[in-house]
Image (spheres, rainbow, N blue to C red):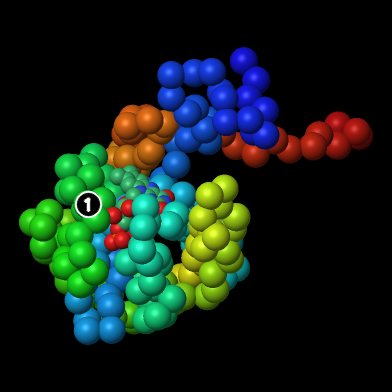
Amino acid sequence: MFWDMKTKDHGLPRNPWKACVAPRPIGWITTINADGAVNLAPYSYFNACGENPPMVMFSGGPRPEGPAKDTVANCEEQGEFVCNMSTWALREEMNLSSLALPAGEDEAALAGLETEPSQLVKPPRIKASPIHIECVYHQTVVMPHNEREEGNRVVFGRVVGLHIDDGVLTDGFVDMAKVQPIARLGYMDYARVDTVFTLDRPKMESAAE
Ligand SMILES: Cc1cc2nc3c(=O)[nH]c(=O)nc-3n(C[C@H](O)[C@H](O)[C@H](O)COP(=O)(O)O)c2cc1C
């Protein structure tokens, strides 16, 4: 099949787009608002997007009506956020935290999740998550949206601190078999990372050899 994006008609039972860039990591993002109220939500248009310095990005679509999503607004207004690793063990809590509670209501508390203070930023970390990325807001790039003037807001952040639970380290390496991250596939599907394989980079053989 081929879907020409100029038409709305893909001819399949459901829009296949999100299944075609998969798996996508899930940034499970804590922020605070001006009153210090904690907010937690998952974003799978999320990734690391730089190494020197480490940077991350996530994209927030507009709400069906009303202002930007709380995570985007809090990042832009308060300037800080934390990306918590979402794992197989925390899959139900992650899902629950996607509920659109009114601004100022804490999805972490709703999901029964304990938080703990971060080191360098004000938003707290999700205690049960094994990896936390503390970030300072860098900039927003507004991307087009087919129906909504306000567009999709892609938030970039600079990583200022990284917590790794010692329990997921094996010989100093982050052991993904212990972390068991989950990733977003298309539709309502997810993947669990439980198999890891290693490939060394290819080397050019010298002509003389
Ligand atoms: C696994 C998962 C991934 C999601 N990814 C995104 C995303 O990338 N962008 C987005 O706008 N909404 C995404 N959502 C929906 C938001 O989590 C949802 O709109 C949430 O209510 C936003 O909360 P907030 O207003 O507190 O930020 C996702 C939901 C789930 C369950």
Query: Which of the pair 195/67 is nearer the observer?
Result: 67
| Label 1 crowd bin: few (<14), some (14–19), many (20+), radius 10 Å | some
User: Where does the image place residue 14, in percent across and percent down from the top left?
Assistant: 43, 24
User: Where does the image place residue 175, in percent across and percent down from the top left?
Assistant: 34, 45
Amino acid type at image mark 1:
Leu
* 171 left or right, relative to 16: left
Q: Residue at x 38, y 30 (%)?
A: 187
Q: Residue furthest top?
A: 1
Secondary structure, mark 1, is loop
User: Where does the image place residue 206, in percent across and percent down from the top left?
Assistant: 86, 37
Q: Residue at x 43, y 76 (%)?
A: 76
Tally of numbered tags: 1
The residue tagged 1 is 99
Query: Which of the pair 59/202 is nearer the observer?
Result: 59
Q: In this orientation, does residue 171 appear?
A: no
Query: Picture quarter containing residue 130?
Result: bottom left
* 37 left or right, relative to 174: left
Query: Picture quarter containing residue 87?
Result: top left
Ligand 1 contact, mark 1 (Cβ < 8 Å): yes
User: Where does the image place residue 54, in percent across and percent down from the top left?
Assistant: 53, 66
The C terminus lies in quadrant: top right
Q: Residue at x 36, y 58 (%)?
A: 65
Q: Residue furthest bottom?
A: 35
* 17 left or right, relative to 171: right
Q: In this orientation, does residue 128 appear?
A: yes
With respect to residue 111, does 141 lie above or below? below
The N terminus lies in quadrant: top right
